[in-house]
Image (spheres, helix red, strand yellow):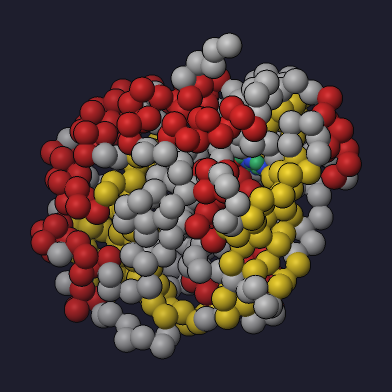
Amino acid sequence: MSVDRDNWAGTVRYRAPRIVAPGTLAEAQRLVASSSKVRALGTRHSFNRLPDTEGVLLHLGELPADPVIDTGAMTVTVGGGTRYGVLARHLEERGLALHNLGSLPHISVAGAISTGTHGSGDRLGSLSSAVRGLQFIGPSGDLVDVRAGDPGFEGMVVGLGAFGPITRVTLAVQPSYRMRQDAYLNLPWQRLMDDLDGVTGAAYSVSLLTTWTAPAIQHVWVKSLLDQPIVTAEQLGAAPALRETPDNMNPFGVEGPWCACLPHFRLDRVPSLGAEIQTEYLLPRDRAVEALGTLREIGRLIDPVLEISELRTVAADGLWLSPAFGRDSLAIHFTFRRDPDGVAQVLPVIEARLLPLGARPHWGKLFDAGADALGPLYPRMDDWRDLQRAYDPEGKFGNRFIERHVTGPRSG
Ligand SMILES: Cc1cc2nc3c(=O)[nH]c(=O)nc-3n(C[C@H](O)[C@H](O)[C@H](O)COP(=O)(O)OP(=O)(O)OC[C@H]3O[C@@H](n4cnc5c(N)ncnc54)[C@H](O)[C@@H]3O)c2cc1C
């Protein structure tokens, strides 16, 4: 099978001399053992050079998903290249569920958890926070199994692909649940700034979509559990939505299983816009209102290159490189136009405002900050660097992106 050389949005062309989709695990292990530089490639939905390598790029999407449910432990173990939408359908058919999903079900499980991908929900950790075990192909080509509680496990989950290709992922599951998704319009900015907690805590999962010069938050997507009261537009201080659900989105105003309500986009349609660049920063909740205020001050700079921003919440976790490590967070996302020059001008301005407030960038999206600026934002960063170096002393699974943004140049 040939694998596309460009990322999903067409904004990055991978430079790896070889991109291979092995048909068997043994073939994948042989490729890792015999190559000096290897990285894994998921469904190519990231927006930077994090996946890239000067050697072999391995896409594991051709290996079987083979989901194995353990009802005693309440876990499922699945092939790392499996897409969330495929896994979600399998679980729902068996009365099971995940705690949350990202906005799109098209991404691979291993690719998503490796970057700290998240949905929204004040009490919901990132998708990575559900990981209970991982199987990697280690530098020698042998399989390496790690489980929650093992030394270093919390460093390996949001691993940026730097511990080798993940072949199997074990995730926590729970009984299936039903939800309803409602869309409201025009939430006044002042209402949000006065009571951010009240708005984002109004339902199981709340997403707010806006530009920065708009007089109000344009869309509020409220995903509610059916066994809890559903907040109305009036209670929230917004207006009810009048429009139809776009064709590529899960329907509004309709009850359904968790997997048909949590992702914004449908697995059988093209998600989002396509011609776009995405960026996102996770802010500690206690600096969130300040962060929104400072971005509104530079809204005239941001909006000419912006399609839409999305505000979501993520609960704290203990994963060393997770952007939500140790703190409940507000995630501020930007879907920019596919205008690399325009975005390159505005990114440093946004970072100059947000990094001093403790913003940590999403590892899978476009950002500018280097290792010097990001290191101090992660209390376990030195432990992660030590762990990765001990695991992969030859630097087989590293790349220039990780050196620039995470570790600094490797010496010796
Ligand atoms: C339309 C769209 C919507 C999005 N919505 C969200 C969202 O709601 N929330 C959010 O947080 N992010 C979102 N993202 C970003 C996306 O979820 C992340 O970039 C995610 O990492 C992409 O997963 P992937 O399978 O495409 O991985 P890739 O982009 O292929 O790779 C990303 C990283 O994962 C590593 N990796 C991939 N497969 C493996 C493997 N088998 N073993 C080890 N490492 C591996 C790669 O080496 C690389 O470091 C969105 C992106 C798009 C395009």
- Residue 159 visible in the picture: yes
- Residue 316 appears in which quarter of the rendering? bottom left
Query: Residue 326 vs residue 301: left or right?
Result: right
For the point 74% across and 31% down, the residue is: 139
Query: Residue 380 vs residue 388: left or right?
Result: left
For the point 68% across and 24% down, the residue is: 396
State the residue in front, 103 or 233. Answer: 103
Quadrant showing the C terminus: top right
- Residue 340 appears in which quarter of the rendering? top left
Query: Residue 337 vs residue 70: left or right?
Result: left
Q: Position of residue 24 (x, y in %)?
A: 88, 45
Above or below residue 270? Residue 152 is: above
For the point 81% across and 35% down, the residue is: 141
Above or below residue 210? Residue 4 is: above
For the point 47% across and 62% down, the residue is: 264
State the residue in front, 153 or 190. Answer: 153
Q: Quadrant of ligand 1?
A: top right
Q: Position of residue 178 (x, y in %)?
A: 50, 82
State the residue in front, 147 or 339. Answer: 147
State the residue in front, 250 or 159. Answer: 159
Quadrant showing the N terminus: top right
Q: Residue furthest top?
A: 412
Above or below residue 255? Residue 3 is: above
